[in-house]
Amino acid sequence: MTKRSPLSDPQLYVVVFIGGAIGTCVRYLLGLAIPATAGGFHFGTLAANLLACFVYAGLSAYLAQADWIRPRKRELVNRGAGMGVCGGLSTMSTLALEGFTGILGGQAGQALLYLLVSVVLGLLVAFAGVWCADRLAAGHRAERTAAAGNPGDSGSDSSDSSNPVSSAEQEARQ
């Protein structure tokens, strides 16, 4: 079975396009709903970026473990919701422009603090997203194990090496 090139997959283009449009609209609305403060903090942009960091990191971590979801569905969700929605929602260019504008506007200290806070909080919420996704995936794995009649292993081992059924066999059953 040959693997198709993502460049020749029109479904991927469509899900990224639709997801990007949704994410960009949400980012725009957050910018309108949460105005910048006089201190140089652009809370709308910060909220959009932090939300995107949390969701994309969590989604990626969850999908990486979700062998019970068919690979094609995982790919489409990852590209549409992750790359599309979260990519449209987060905005490095706006963050950089806001920081640069603050520096040029005589608020270098506040602008640099805003940039630092954005990066540090982004990393922290990405970590939190992965942590939540790991717990959610472990719960789903435990439910699937119990439903399959293997109550001895609750799915605490993320490799799930005790399950003799391969991923290919699980996909074939679905």
Image: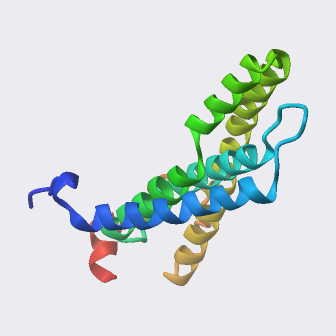
Q: Position of residue 157 (x, y in %)?
A: 56, 54
Q: Residue furthest left?
A: 1
- Left or right: where does residue 1 sit relative to residue 19? left
Residue 146, quarter of picture? bottom right
Considering depth in this image, is 124 or 7 the residue closer to the camera?
Answer: 7
Q: Which residue is at a point 81% across and 54% down the rendered structure image?
A: 34
Rendered position, 132 above or below 67? above
Q: How many marks?
A: 0
Considering depth in this image, is 125 or 134 the residue closer to the camera?
Answer: 125
Considering depth in this image, is 146 or 98 the residue closer to the camera?
Answer: 98
- Left or right: where does residue 108 sit relative to residue 164? right
Q: Which residue is at a point 30% across and 62% down the rendered structure image?
A: 12
Q: Position of residue 48 (x, y in %)?
A: 68, 51
Residue 94, quarter of picture? top right
Rendered position, 169 above or below 17? below
Q: How is the image coloured?
A: rainbow
- Left or right: where does residue 9 sit relative to residue 105? left
Q: Quadrant of the N terminus?
A: bottom left
Question: Is any part of residue 66 visible from this angle?
Answer: no
- Left or right: where does residue 118 sit relative to residue 92? right
Q: Position of residue 124 (x, y in %)?
A: 73, 38
Q: Which residue is at a point 27% across and 68% down the rendered structure image?
A: 11
Q: Position of residue 174 (x, y in %)?
A: 34, 82
